[in-house]
Amino acid sequence: MIASHESSFRQADRARWAVLGAVIAAAVFMLSWAVLHRGFYAGYQIVDTPVYQKYGDWVATGQVPYRDFRPEYPPVALPVFVAPSLVASAGAPLEEYSRVFETLMAICGATAVALVAVTLRSLGASVARLAAALVFAALAPLALGTVVLSRFDLWPAALTIGALAAFVAGRERLGAGVAGLAVAAKLYPGVLVPLAAAWVWRRYGRREALVCGGIFLAVVAACFVPFVLLAPEGVAASLGRQLSRPLQIESLGSAVLLALGLDVEMESGHGSQNIAGTPGLVVGIMATFAQGAALLGLWVAFARGPMERERLVRFSAAAVLAFVAFGKVLSPQFLIWLIPLVPLVRGRRGLAASGLLALSLILTQIWFPFRYWDFALTFDTTLSWLVLARDVALVSALAVLVWPPRGVGRELARAAKRNRDRVGQAAPAAPATLVRR
């Protein structure tokens, strides 16, 4: 009874620390957001908000997405484009739209940071671990730079960490619903769906897995089907544009080509600068295979191992890292997806991966946005090596997350030997001679 009371006190203490940490970290995140508008950060920017405003104004004036115009993003991305147009009024100056949009993204970012605390609370994290993860997430915008201000990626990032927090807390049906919203906001959270399916099936059985799968599909359908019925070609064109993007110049494959000084050409398209011609096509195909193989390996490895919450968190971070690091496209805003996930990982492994992620954020800011066009237009040698260093840092972070623990090979060998010994002991002795009857 005394031990039970002590356990309850410890849980209550952890809950108080998690709430306090979430509040403080969200406040620090908002302070970081304010700093991004001052001094060094207030210089040159490359923004996407004019595109968002165009979509938002069209919807605010009565046009139907995918039928009257074709946005390149899934349906649940649209609310964060439309809301600033409604608040600032359609046709307002870009400065007014941007101010509302940035406020909305700041709220999403602070929410994501708070959900980091919620997830760690469910994991029973220590105060030191909680503090380290929250400090990283709250200060990460300063390492990455102003790209966070004018991209909507904090919205799907908040939905993704919300879904993971629900699964870790044992709220699988809620997690399935939020995961559906995340996929309908930006497609990348789909890499977590096989992990979640294995998690629910192995822990709660086939019936619960089917229920959660039904919830996920119902949410995705509710987001997509109305637009599919109105404008199937528009929805197909939107998805096709995302899935058919060429090899972007910041991707790992492109960075290798440029760092080696190979003769390639840049071609703009799909909203980015890409490697043109046969080199871009061939390396893009190789990148797609590498990305698919890495994800498949992660899904299978997770499904075959113990269903522990720490493993779910680690493999979730690894899956998104694999998707980002090996993809044909690696825009700076993709790093936003990793900020709430990688710091969740426990122990030295988590610290090392978070350190490598921090390095990749800083390396990105060195050349984006300030020297991006030097890189894109002239393939500056120094910048090419910096981009490659950033991409290698991401691959290294992935390797840290998936590398087997020390001694695991020996332990598996010993377990296999014990199994063989038990089988041998249980088998009947062979007869000394065979008698033909």
Image: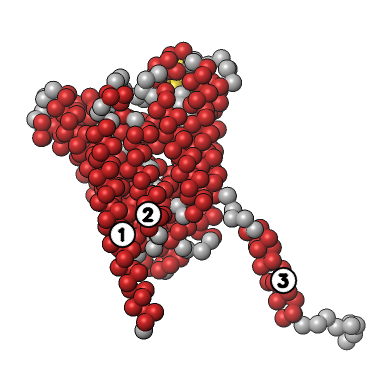
Q: State the SS at label 3.
A: helix
Q: State the SS at label 1.
A: helix
To which quarter of the image does residue 99 belong? top left
What amino acid is found at the position of numbered circle 1 in the picture?
A: Trp
How is colour applied across the structure in the image? Answer: secondary structure
Q: Position of residue 329 (x, y in %)?
A: 43, 31
Q: Which residue is mark 2?
A: 130
- Number of the label disc, if any, that sits on residue 420: 3
- Number of the label disc, if any, that sits on residue 17: 1
Contact between marks 1 and 3 (CB within 8 A): the answer is: no
Position of the C terminus by quadrant: bottom right
Outermost residue toward the top in this view:
378
Q: Residues within 10 Å of mark 3 (few under 14, many from 20)?
A: few
Residue under the image location 46 percent in, 55 percent down? 346
Task: Depth check: give the residue in front, 427 or 131.
Answer: 131
Where is 200 relative to 191, above or below? below
Left or right: where 266 falls relative to 87:
right
Which of pointers 1 and 3 indicates the residue nearer the eye? 1
Earlier residue among tags 2 and 3: 2
Position of the N terminus by quadrant: bottom left
Q: Residues within 10 Å of mark 2 (few under 14, many from 20)?
A: many
Earlier residue among tags 1 and 3: 1
